[in-house]
Image (cartoon, rainbow, N blue to C red):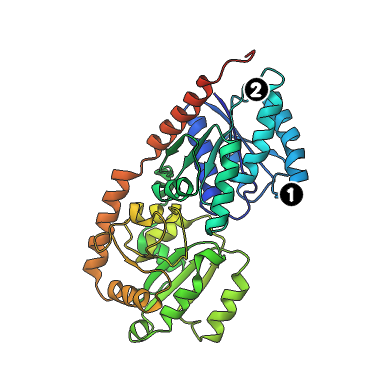
Amino acid sequence: MRIALAIMSLELGGGAEHDIVHLSAGLKKAGHEPIVITSGGRLCKDVEANGVEVVRCPIATRKLSELRRNGVRLAEIAESHGIDVLNPQGVYPGISCYLASRRLSKKGLAVPNILTIHMLQRFTWWYYKLGSFVINRIAKHVIVESHCERLRLQRRGMNRPLTVLYNCFPPEKYERETRSREEIRRDMNWDDDKIVFIMPARMSEEKNHKLLFEALAGPDVQALDKRILCYLAGDGDLLEQNKKAVAEMHLGDRVVFGGFRRDIPSLLQGADAYLLCSHYESLPLSIREAMGAGLPVVSTDVGGISEAVEDRKSGLLVPPGDAKSFGAAMARLATDAELRKDMGRRGRELFHEKFEYDNWIRRTVEVLDQVRTEIPACGR
């Protein structure tokens, strides 16, 4: 099956972008012929390293006129590559793929538009209402990564056939690391007496790094006499703002900004615990990566995170926006090595129970093929 995965950009290096890297590689390994259509970005080389073709197209747009033009471009790409299925990631690429699918159908080519939604861009009722309205008109089928996102869409009127697929990553991401935990920490300048909390996340509004800074300035963490070190891996629009906040709050000895990293699996194996302090989420890939690495989780209880993390068993979930509770949870893990070990062990068990890479690839293929075969051949 020839599958076109369309995503606006591979530049940010977030969960959706890494999903494309992992999904395209898995589809190719399973004997299919994926291509990735994107405007570009630094993860393009990761896709190409797996032997998957990247087709550049200026689809990083929200302008109606450009979406229409991209419909023409995508139709040409799909026809020239003999594409069987379009699988856009997000509503805006979904609109262009829908227009491409319609254009192809007029030529007698049946190429369904199967839309993957990771999470809508704005977490407001009216945006989900509008998004659901659009999705109902452009998608033959919808794939989401969590039951939480399914409910958000369906409660706002989305009525297309839908499948929940827990995305994942190939297990060899951890097998490539040959260094010991001690060597990783030494290379990162993480002292043995530091409890390292790692947060791999874009510097964007929904990730709410401000909550972490407030927790670090609170009494529970301050009482630990600088034993906690927070390593923030990621960049984004709010990077400089977050650096300024850390400086103004005099937290420079507790926070390290690591920038964009390609070696997150290695860093997770050297850290002691994982952090996430988001306002809203679907089900972040980074939480599954942390669970796979055997790290306990401290996170706000938002979105589909509780679908992965068992509160007080594999991690500690706190109410969103509650800096005091977040700091208390960090302090509890920092002062209890056995608790960290037990929660990390349970997290790894849950990871293997719920999130399995080959199963994600197999189920994705089943969904794409089922929708494709339900459509009349139309000359193919």
Q: Nearer the viewer, residue 72 or 223?
A: 72
- Rendered-image quadrant of the C terminus: top right
Above or below residue 257? Residue 8 is above
What residue is pinned by disc 1?
A: 63
Q: Nearer the viewer, residue 177 or 309?
A: 309
- At 28% across and 50% down in the image, what residue appears? 350
Above or below residue 286? Residue 169 is above
Is residue 53 found left or right of 302 in the rendered image? right
Quick check: marks 1 and 2 in contact, CB under 8 Å? no
Neighbours of disc 1 within 10 Å: few (<14), some (14-19), many (20+)? few
Q: How many marks?
A: 2
Above or below residue 351? Residue 202 is below
Q: Nearer the viewer, residue 337 or 175?
A: 337
Where residue 56 sits in the image (x, y, percent)? Answer: 71, 40
Where residue 173 sits in the image (x, y, percent)? Answer: 43, 47
Q: Earlier in the sequence, mark 1 or mark 2?
A: 1
Where residue 54 sits in the image (x, y, percent)? Answer: 65, 38
CA–CA distance in space, label 1 to label 2: 28 Å
Look at the image and tell me whether residue 296 can be seen. yes
What residue is pinned by disc 2?
A: 82
Front tag of 1 and 2? 1
